[in-house]
Image (tube, helix red, strand yellow):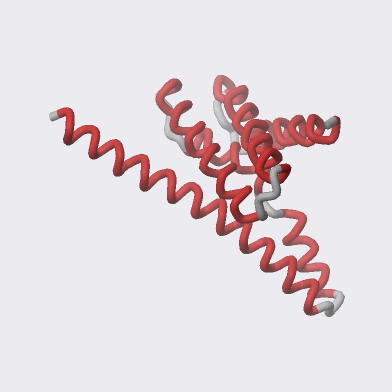
Amino acid sequence: MMSYVIQILTALLGSLGFAIIFKMKRRHLPADCIGGGATWFVYLICAHFGMDIFFANLLATLFASAYSEIMRNICRTPRTVFVIPAVVPLIPGSSLYYAMSAVVAENKSLAEHFAVQTGLVAGAIAFGILLFTVVFHVVHKIIRVINK
C-alpha cells in the first residue's frame, strides 16, 4: 500500500517537473500534477487487477485524455497542456533502458523482450490518445447535428 502512495507521489512530481521544464503556465501546474498522479493511479488499479501492460496503459491513457478534455473546457486552454504531462508517468523509460542494455550485452532474447514491452507501452499511449480524440470528436459532431 505504501509503495502505491510513493509511486503516485513520484508521478505527481514527475509531471510537475515536466510541466516546469517545458514552461507551462503557473496556473496550470496543479492540474498537470493531478493529471499525472491520477493517470498513474488508474494504471496501478489496472495492473493490480491483472491487466496486461498494453491494456493497463491504454486505459490509463484514455483516462488522461478524458481528464485533459475536461480541464481544457474548465481552463479554456489547448488539451495538450494537460494530456502531455498526464501521460509522462506512463512513458516506458525503464524498459527502453533495459532493451538497450541487453543489446549492448548482446543478449538477444532479453533485448527482444524489453523492446516488445517498450513498443506495447508506446503503442498503447499513442492509440489511447488517438482513440479518445476520434471518439470524442465523432460523438461531439453527432450531438451538434442532433441539436440543430
Q: Is residue 90 left or right of residue 75?
A: right
Foreground pick, 111 / 5: 5
Which quarter of the figure has residue 20?
A: top right
Foreground pick, 116 / 17: 116
The residue positioned 61% from the left and 25% from the top of the image is 29
Foreground pick, 103 / 148: 148
The residue positioned 72% from the left and 54% from the top of the image is 93
The quadrant of the picture occupied by the N terminus is top right
Relative image position of residue 53 (x, y in whole percent): 66, 54
Looking at this view, name the residue that lies furthest to the front.
49
Q: Work out whether 74 lies above or below 109.
A: above
The quadrant of the picture occupied by the C terminus is top left
Relative image position of residue 41 (x, y in whole percent): 68, 35
Relative image position of residue 22 (x, y in whole percent): 60, 38
Which quarter of the figure has residue 69?
A: top left
Q: Is residue 61 left or right of residue 18?
A: left
Foreground pick, 114 / 76: 114
Q: Work out whether 125 lies above or below 48.
A: below
Q: Work out whether 60 lies above or below 35.
A: below
Relative image position of residue 60 (x, y in whole percent): 59, 42
The residue positioned 73% from the left and 73% from the top of the image is 112
How many numbered callouts?
0
Q: Is residue 79 left or right of residue 139?
A: right
The residue positioned 48% from the left and 47% from the top of the image is 129
